[in-house]
Image (cartoon, rainbow, N blue to C red):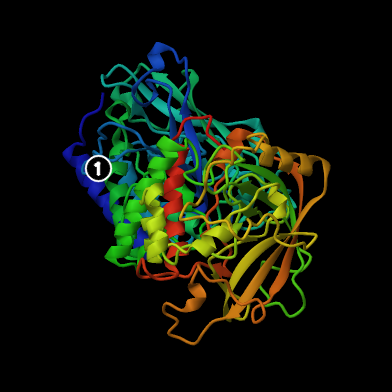
Amino acid sequence: MTEPASPDADAGITDIDELQRLLMRSTGPGLRGQHFKQHGCVFATFEVLADLPERLKVGLFAEPKTYTTYIRFSNGAQLDDTKPDIHGMAIKLTGVAGRKILEGEEDEATHDFVLADKPVFFIRNTSDYVRFMADFAQSAPRGEPPLAFIAWLKENRPEDLPLLLGFRQQVQDSPLAARYWSQVPYAYGLGNAQACRYSVVPSKDNLVSPIPSEARGAGYLREAMTDHLTREARPAVFDFCVQLNDDTSATTIDNPTVEWTTPVEAVARITIPPQTFTSAAQLAFGENLSFTPWHALPEHRPLGEINEVRRRVYLSSSGLRHETNQVIRREPTGNEHWSFNMRLSPEELTAGINDDFKAVLAKLQATFNFMAANLQHGRATHTYGVVAKGEARCITPAGFPETDVFVPGRIFPIILRHSSPGGRADDRARDGVAASIKFFEPGASTDGDGFYDILMNAGRQLFVRSIRDFSTFVHTPDAERAKLVESGLMLDDQLREAYRIRGSFTDSRYHTWVCFEFIDKTGVSRYVRFRLINADRGPDRGLPRPEFKANGHPSMDAVSDDDRAPDFLRKDFIHRVKHSDVRYILQAQLRDAPPPPIGNHELFDPSQPWNEYWFPWVDMFEIRLNEVIDDQAAVSCLEMNPNRSPECIRIPLATSPDDYASLGHARAIVYPGARAARAAVPPPQNN
């Protein structure tokens, strides 16, 4: 079918590699040699179709399965999107079992497809490629076409000249609305019977509102993706297709300049869900990814000389790029997208913690993952709740520190979820109550992860002081937790205040317990806590009687004479949202940063409320709910993380598990892992 590169071809590949590296050094070795302008790197699903005919059930497509996938869209060479160019769609599947053919990376669980919006390539073999690259490496940095290669092609392969001249002539309406091709062939099976080319065909619904030509700027392709995936919150769907060919002769395999005429057949479906993909973390993730068609199963091995060129050159240029940028080149696992729009990266969150902190985190992570996947069949805590959406109007008063986000009069779409912290299905259980709010960009829909999450519970403070104390509480049997109260590790008065004699989720006041760094437009740093109160500004209702004792129990069974329905809290909230006017006020307490070094300052202590006389509550948002979300699949996907925040809000970081700030810090690290474990739980999940 195809043979290893000949000595001449091998020498040519070495020349191409050197020329590619020369080109990268002239344009910037920290950038990709080609396709360096990224429109976006999005996460998606790659679903192998069921009921494929037997002849298509090969390798990756042998059985129905869904893979978490990352897709990078790019320009081939132009920085200005309005100028014609070749455009790329690079696809990386994760969680693909089986040995791969890329030397040194055989055990990686990824599989790549590299495509462009032109069905054929303009170069046939290695010797032609060397000639092209020798000219291109000199002309491209000057912004000039490869005139010497064009002249040679006109003289020696005139039939290929239109391919070269038309190769970079595509103008897209949107990267999501274009068709893409692999151009070069791949095996389809372990034998030599068939080859294939890949293509990706967009749904007609991927382009609903194209940007008018006169309104298109240099970055309009990213804007088009943002309009579709973020502002309109629409999914983008593609058919992933194969085009089989029984002619596996060298004449066919080593001539990517000719289109094949065999049928194109869909074998998988790609779905890019609505998402915000322009966070710094997600863009950096896309820049640091490496794609090569040799990240592949043996059944789909690349064929032909052009693919042999790609094997060496792609790895070499990727190595140079990562070395220049001082970034470790690694393959993704498929869980990275849980942290894409977070304020701090996983590296920033873990850089300064000591080994003791790491050990506590590892134990908690394992426990929360186990609880989500095996005990609760859903969220590890706050398992059962109810969700509504509405809007939050910023009402910060004059004199409130200015930011680019909290602007008076600005209206944000929101989702609010109420829940029972103890994770009990029965609303009659004696427990606390919780409220979490997810903010979305003004004008956007409420699909996706939003840009800001605030997590709150009843009670002004937490019943432990640090993440070590919290871990001790979690890993102590319920019957023995009274001893933790006796020792002073658990604070029973604080725990008692978190309990509610529950009648309605709308009765309580909710507090963040932990504080956050708050940076205004001038760069002044303060600290902030939040609370949510009913819009009637009434008292905190439902507090237990003074004689009630929690004795270290965070929740208890219902009392025997409680004859209410097991889901009365959820039904009450749904009824209120549907038939009443459910409104809240989100308030903030601001506190100046103490002089450095701040260290383990008492302001971080989650077990102590801030003095309301010295640090009064200030109204920030008026919240109105108008629609219940009863789609349980959507609710299962809803995730809250205190690390998802705008630039003006940041989690204080701890060093030790005994630091007061360790609780909020730890949640930002543990929650994404628990979400990944929960995502693997088969539906329906408990909500």
User: Is residue 337 among the parts visible in the rendering?
Assistant: yes
**Residue 203, x across and y down, in percent:** 61, 31
- Residue at position x 50%, y 39% from top? 44
The disc labelled 1 sits on which kind of residue? Glu
Q: Label 1, secondary structure: give it.
A: loop
- Residue at position x 77%, y 78% from top? 398
Instruction: Give the residue at the far bottom of this rendering.
Output: 595
Judging depth in this view, the residue of 3 and 144 nearest the camera is 3
**Label 1 belongs to which residue?**
105
Q: Quadrant of the C terminus?
A: top right
**Residue 380, x across and y down, in percent:** 47, 44
Give neighbour class at mark 1: few <14, some 14-19, many 20+ (Cα, 10 Å). Answer: some
Counting every numbered tag in the picture gives 1
User: Is residue 76 among the parts visible in the rendering?
Assistant: no
Judging depth in this view, the residue of 130 and 376 nearest the camera is 376
Classify residue 142 as left or right of residue 23.
right
Classify residue 449 as left or right of residue 265.
right
